[in-house]
Image (cartoon, grey):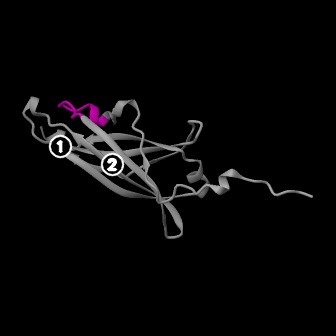
Amino acid sequence: MLLPVFNYNQTKKPPIDTWIKLTVPNEGKVVYNKVALFNNIPLSNFKNINGDAKFVNRHGGYLFGYKINFDIALLDSIGIKEVTYGISFKFTLIDKDGFEIREIESLIVPVESGKKYESQDIIPEYFTLKTIELTKSINLVLYIHECRSCKTY
Protein backbone atom coordinates (compact mmCIF):
# COMPACT_ATOMS: atom_id res chain seq x y z
CA MET A 1 0.00 0.00 0.00
CA LEU A 2 1.36 3.41 -0.99
CA LEU A 3 1.01 6.24 1.45
CA PRO A 4 0.42 9.78 0.23
CA VAL A 5 3.51 11.97 0.18
CA PHE A 6 3.35 14.85 2.64
CA ASN A 7 4.51 18.09 1.07
CA TYR A 8 5.30 20.75 3.65
CA ASN A 9 5.04 23.58 1.08
CA GLN A 10 1.44 22.67 0.34
CA THR A 11 0.47 23.32 3.96
CA LYS A 12 1.91 26.83 3.98
CA LYS A 13 -0.11 29.68 2.58
CA PRO A 14 1.84 31.58 -0.11
CA PRO A 15 2.55 35.24 0.77
CA ILE A 16 -0.33 36.74 -1.23
CA ASP A 17 -1.79 40.05 -0.02
CA THR A 18 0.77 40.06 2.82
CA TRP A 19 3.29 42.91 3.03
CA ILE A 20 6.93 41.80 2.89
CA LYS A 21 9.60 44.17 4.25
CA LEU A 22 12.02 45.09 1.45
CA THR A 23 15.76 44.63 1.94
CA VAL A 24 17.87 47.59 0.82
CA PRO A 25 21.38 46.24 0.13
CA ASN A 26 24.65 48.24 0.19
CA GLU A 27 23.48 50.59 2.94
CA GLY A 28 20.88 52.14 0.65
CA LYS A 29 23.26 53.26 -2.06
CA VAL A 30 21.51 54.05 -5.34
CA VAL A 31 22.61 53.01 -8.83
CA TYR A 32 23.18 55.69 -11.46
CA ASN A 33 22.91 55.39 -15.23
CA LYS A 34 25.92 56.94 -17.00
CA VAL A 35 23.65 59.67 -18.40
CA ALA A 36 22.77 60.72 -14.84
CA LEU A 37 26.43 60.64 -13.77
CA PHE A 38 27.83 62.81 -16.55
CA ASN A 39 26.06 66.11 -16.02
CA ASN A 40 27.44 69.44 -14.92
CA ILE A 41 26.12 69.43 -11.33
CA PRO A 42 26.62 67.04 -8.39
CA LEU A 43 24.00 64.42 -7.61
CA SER A 44 21.58 64.62 -4.68
CA ASN A 45 21.88 62.31 -1.73
CA PHE A 46 19.06 59.73 -1.52
CA LYS A 47 18.52 58.53 2.05
CA ASN A 48 16.14 56.73 4.41
CA ILE A 49 15.17 54.26 1.67
CA ASN A 50 12.69 51.66 2.90
CA GLY A 51 9.51 49.94 1.86
CA ASP A 52 7.29 46.92 1.56
CA ALA A 53 5.98 44.78 -1.29
CA LYS A 54 3.31 42.16 -1.79
CA PHE A 55 1.82 39.90 -4.40
CA VAL A 56 -1.80 40.75 -5.12
CA ASN A 57 -4.45 38.62 -6.79
CA ARG A 58 -5.89 40.65 -9.67
CA HIS A 59 -7.88 39.57 -12.72
CA GLY A 60 -7.19 35.88 -12.13
CA GLY A 61 -3.41 36.30 -11.78
CA TYR A 62 -0.78 37.53 -9.35
CA LEU A 63 0.81 40.98 -9.68
CA PHE A 64 3.57 42.69 -7.67
CA GLY A 65 2.66 45.73 -5.57
CA TYR A 66 4.97 47.99 -3.60
CA LYS A 67 5.14 51.06 -1.40
CA ILE A 68 8.48 52.82 -0.93
CA ASN A 69 9.60 55.81 1.15
CA PHE A 70 12.77 57.85 0.71
CA ASP A 71 14.20 61.35 1.06
CA ILE A 72 16.21 63.34 -1.48
CA ALA A 73 18.56 66.04 -0.16
CA LEU A 74 18.71 69.57 -1.56
CA LEU A 75 21.73 70.81 -3.49
CA ASP A 76 21.99 74.12 -1.61
CA SER A 77 25.78 74.01 -1.70
CA ILE A 78 25.78 75.08 -5.35
CA GLY A 79 22.79 77.43 -5.21
CA ILE A 80 20.33 75.14 -7.00
CA LYS A 81 17.15 74.54 -5.04
CA GLU A 82 15.53 71.72 -7.01
CA VAL A 83 16.76 69.06 -9.39
CA THR A 84 14.40 66.59 -11.09
CA TYR A 85 15.51 62.99 -11.61
CA GLY A 86 13.94 60.14 -13.54
CA ILE A 87 14.14 57.07 -11.30
CA SER A 88 12.85 53.51 -11.20
CA PHE A 89 12.75 50.84 -8.53
CA LYS A 90 14.47 47.53 -9.22
CA PHE A 91 13.31 44.52 -7.24
CA THR A 92 15.11 41.19 -6.97
CA LEU A 93 13.15 38.20 -5.67
CA ILE A 94 15.37 35.95 -3.53
CA ASP A 95 14.79 32.34 -2.48
CA LYS A 96 15.58 30.75 0.92
CA ASP A 97 19.15 29.93 -0.15
CA GLY A 98 19.93 33.47 -1.34
CA PHE A 99 19.59 32.77 -5.06
CA GLU A 100 17.94 35.27 -7.36
CA ILE A 101 14.62 34.08 -8.74
CA ARG A 102 13.62 37.06 -10.85
CA GLU A 103 14.25 40.77 -11.32
CA ILE A 104 11.54 43.29 -12.07
CA GLU A 105 11.55 47.05 -12.51
CA SER A 106 8.96 49.78 -12.07
CA LEU A 107 8.20 52.45 -14.60
CA ILE A 108 10.40 55.56 -14.54
CA VAL A 109 8.93 58.30 -12.33
CA PRO A 110 10.05 61.92 -11.83
CA VAL A 111 11.24 62.99 -8.36
CA GLU A 112 12.59 66.33 -7.13
CA SER A 113 15.39 67.02 -4.69
CA GLY A 114 14.58 68.37 -1.24
CA LYS A 115 11.47 66.25 -0.74
CA LYS A 116 10.23 63.17 1.07
CA TYR A 117 8.60 60.60 -1.19
CA GLU A 118 6.14 57.80 -0.81
CA SER A 119 5.60 55.84 -3.98
CA GLN A 120 3.02 53.08 -4.30
CA ASP A 121 2.12 51.14 -7.43
CA ILE A 122 1.48 47.74 -8.98
CA ILE A 123 3.83 46.46 -11.70
CA PRO A 124 1.74 45.04 -14.56
CA GLU A 125 3.60 41.73 -14.89
CA TYR A 126 2.08 38.42 -13.81
CA PHE A 127 3.81 35.95 -11.48
CA THR A 128 3.31 32.22 -11.12
CA LEU A 129 2.24 30.83 -7.79
CA LYS A 130 5.49 28.79 -7.76
CA THR A 131 7.59 31.99 -8.02
CA ILE A 132 5.63 33.52 -5.17
CA GLU A 133 6.06 30.43 -3.00
CA LEU A 134 9.83 30.38 -3.62
CA THR A 135 10.25 34.08 -2.73
CA LYS A 136 11.60 34.49 0.80
CA SER A 137 12.95 38.06 0.54
CA ILE A 138 12.94 40.96 -1.90
CA ASN A 139 15.83 43.36 -2.52
CA LEU A 140 15.19 46.98 -3.56
CA VAL A 141 17.57 49.27 -5.43
CA LEU A 142 16.78 52.80 -6.60
CA TYR A 143 18.02 53.32 -10.13
CA ILE A 144 18.64 56.87 -11.35
CA HIS A 145 18.17 57.00 -15.12
CA GLU A 146 18.66 60.68 -15.74
CA CYS A 147 18.85 64.12 -14.25
CA ARG A 148 15.99 65.73 -16.18
CA SER A 149 16.60 69.29 -15.07
CA CYS A 150 20.44 69.23 -15.20
CA LYS A 151 20.46 70.16 -18.89
CA THR A 152 19.02 73.58 -18.09
CA TYR A 153 21.83 74.70 -15.76
Between 66 and 5, the one lying in front of the other is 5
Q: Is the magenta stretch mostly helix, strand or loop?
A: loop
Q: Which of marks 1 and 2 is nearer the N terminus?
A: 2
Specify the farthest residue to the left: 79
**Mark 1: secondary structure:** loop
**Marking on residue 68:** 2
Q: Who's the residue at 59% across and 52% down the image?
A: 133
Whole-percent x, y for residue 91 in the image: 44, 45
Residue placed farthest to the right in the image? 1
Looking at the image, residue 136 sits to the left or right of residue 65; the answer is right
Segment tinted magenta in the rendering: 35-45
The correct choice, above or below, for 46 with respect to 62 in the image is: above
At label 1, the amino acid type is Ser
Residue tagged 1:
149
Above/below status of 42 relative to 86 = above
Q: Does the magenta stretch include residue 80?
A: no
For the C terminus, the quadrant is top left
Q: How many numbered marks appear?
A: 2
